[in-house]
Image (cartoon, rainbow, N blue to C red):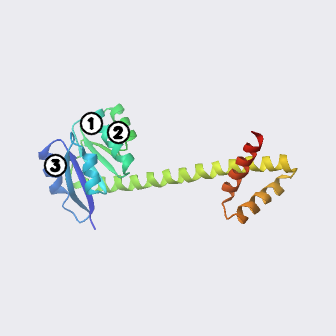
Amino acid sequence: MPRRILLVRSDPQRAESLYRWLQTPAYLIDAEATVDSDFVAVAATCQPRLVIIDVDAPDDGLLARVRQLCASRPLPVVLFTRQDSRETIRKAVQAGVSSYIVDGFEPRRLVSLLDVAVARFHETERLKTELQVTRATLAERKTVERAKGILMKQKGLDEPQAYHALRKLAMDRNLRIGQAAENVIAVAEVLEA
């Protein structure tokens, strides 16, 4: 099944070239918008799997719409441009651009560039998910440690006993240990008030 593309363009002639070069089994230009349009709304309607933006120089308004698009529906965004300013590249990446290609509009390289951008996007998304899981796990561990400290202080338990009590509470109430720890902390805060 071809990857559906939203093409956001400034130059109709270059867009026509993209149409020709992307007549492959892997990619299909499904919708088109201009760089000045509300391409975020177009993306919401056509549900592309990839966005290609072709513009001479991306401005802050365009990058704000890219940021809005990526916040509402993360997907790979490939930006072809003639602008090679480091500051513009930094802003584009912060907005969510997966691949920023300066003067790289060669037919023989196009599919490879898109494949790399898509692979990079998926790897970045995987790393973001892994980071969120790691942060959540760390926060849960801190909560468990705090709850164990409360149990040790209030019940006179040692650390293994406090952990066992938390674990038993979690099993008895069909909760994760982090949720049981949150409950212990909440009760302790109410009693201290």
On screen, residue 48 above or below 100: below
Count neighbours of disc 3 (C-alpha within 10 A) and say few if under 14, some if 14 to 19, many if 20 or more: some
Give the Cα separation between the discs numbered 2 and 3. Answer: 21 Å
- Circle 2: element type: helix
| Residue that mark 1 sits on | 58
Give the Cα separation between the discs numbered 1 and 3. Answer: 16 Å
- Circle 1: element type: loop
Q: Amino acid at mark 2?
A: Ala
- Circle 3: element type: helix
Q: Which one is nearer the viewer's eye here, 27 or 115?
A: 27
Proximity of marks 1 and 3: CB atoms separated by less than 8 Å: no
Q: Earlier in the sequence, mark 2 or mark 3?
A: 3
Q: Is residue 180 left or right of residue 24?
A: right
Q: Earlier in the sequence, mark 1 or mark 3?
A: 3
Q: Amino acid at mark 3?
A: Ala
On residue 15, the disc is: 3
Q: Position of residue 166 (x, y in %)?
A: 75, 57
Proximity of marks 2 and 1: CB atoms separated by less than 8 Å: yes
On residue 26, the disc is: none
On residue 92, the disc is: 2
On screen, residue 183 above or below 191: below
Quarter containing the N terminus: bottom left
Q: Amino acid at mark 1?
A: Pro
Residue 62: quarter of image: top left
